[in-house]
Amino acid sequence: MESATVAARAGSSPVPDKGLKRNAIGYISNVVIGVASTAPAYSLAATLGFIVAVKGVRLQSPAVLLVSFVPMLCIAFAYRYMNRADPDAGTSFIWVTRGLNPQLGWITGWAIVAADIIVMANLAQIAGKYTFLLFGWHSAASSTAAQIIAGLIWIGVMTAICYWGIELSARTQQVLLGLEFTLLVVFSIVALIKVYTVNPAGSLHPHFSWFWPGSISSFSAMADGVLLGIFIYWGWDSGVAVNEESENSAEGPGRAAVVSTLMLLVIYLVVSAAAQAYGGTKLLENNSDDVLSVLGTKVFGSGLDKLLIIAVLTSASASTQTTILPTARTTLSMAKWRAIPQVFGRVHPRHMTPSVSTLAMGGVSAVWFALILAFNSSGDVLGDAIAALGFCVAFYYVLTGLACAVFYRRELFRSVKNFVFAGLLPVAGFAMLAAVFVKAFTYYGKAGSNYSKPILGIQTPIFIGVGSLVLGGVLMLVAWGRYPRFFRRWWFESAPPGLLEQPVHHAEAHLWGPSHEHEQPEQPAIP
């Protein structure tokens, strides 16, 4: 049954105040947090070589990154339009709850949490390892125990920064991302200059065909490359998760999501082309687990070869922090809407941050990281965990895109702009990422496609990624029994008439008043 339109009339209640610090950060910080959360340097270092190694891709790796960007941009528009209607820190959790139903909304919130916890092990391991490499301590860098200790310290430091306040988090990100981007740009410029002047062995001059998707040999090769490319872009939505603490909360964070994806596209195309031009495909493929540190030694030479190590280190550490931020706010929102235990909704009275949720995210991440590294010192499971988190990411992005189109279904034909940006693009992102999910399940479900041995007879990426979603479904059923009021919410809500034509300050989420008081259950009050 289709719900009546959600009222945005005078007198309806605004987005409930969760106790977070209002107007604490500006638009630039939204963009910085979104970009930093993707860990550009680390993502390229860990993934570019594998994309080049895909049979049928090779020199067209920049084209794969260009194609991978398209569904991200489509979903970014879904985030922008849903944030305009409802700038709630729970983002996809509450948007899917409203646009589709509370059952899918709850699992969407879980998927965000699961993806962030899964990736924290990789980020902490890289941050710990590169800390030792920065000081030339190679024995410690290759020691599992040393990596665990250093990684736990990094998780602790970044958790503390998130706990102490959103302004400190934002300033930290600006410094780390500024350093990271500067080093990546310098690397690209120096590498390309040397390609044209010194002509190093194995180097190639960049060509237009590198960026043209039509040059990729087959659709299968394209799909396999995009599976890796999706990981490189994931994380830009973190800048939206701090919407309730942002200036112009209904417009700024959503616009920042779109700008973040565009910035990532530019830096990825430039750095991938420069790396490929300097080292050639063979060098990238042979050093696929750490492309940038190898290239840094060759491009910068003695004395300056630590620059890219610093870039990857700042990238991983920054992303460790920006992974904690959205997860804590997702669980905060879920608690405030009576979907999980209320203890996760506590906000520190002085710092005005999600105190319990932040500490819980840091603690669970630390345990996950220590266990996965201690029981798998070879790091094979860490490699498969990257593929595994793709299932969670695709899941909540897919549902967000669909929820946007459903929520705005009555507004889509009021203008071409509405149809394209609030309907067509989110649905296109939904379709593309749904196809990626199916392709990933087929690809990673095959023996020989992964780094580690199967777990209980199931390929590791499937066991961790899809298994975590199945676990989320089970936990949702448990929550349904404990918090029935949340799950009695009306399904398929729709945007107020003319919402997208209103000035932003009028369109800001005054949407929690019930559509039909006689039909829709009363919404839980915020304590």
Image (cartoon, rainbow, N blue to C red):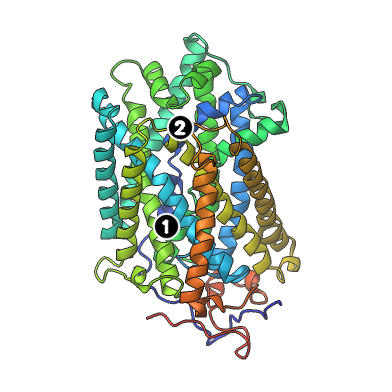
Q: Which mark is residue 46?
A: 2
Q: Is mark 2 on a helix, strand or loop?
A: helix
Q: What residue type is labelled 1?
A: Pro
- As drawn, is 47 to the left or to the right of 402? left
Q: Nearer the viewer, residue 58 or 488?
A: 488
Toward which corner of the image does residue 66 lie, by quadrant?
top right
Q: Which amino acid does label 2 sit on?
A: Ala
Q: Where is residue 77 in the image (x, y as percent from the top left)?
A: 60, 56
Q: Position of residue 165 (x, y in %)?
A: 29, 60
Q: Where is residue 115 in the image (x, y as percent from the top left)?
A: 47, 50
Q: Residue 231 carries which label?
A: none
For residue 56, above or below residue 234: above
For residue 361, above or below residue 376: below
Nearer-N-terminus badge (1/2): 2
Q: Nearer the viewer, residue 326 or 176?
A: 326
Residue holding disc 1: 326
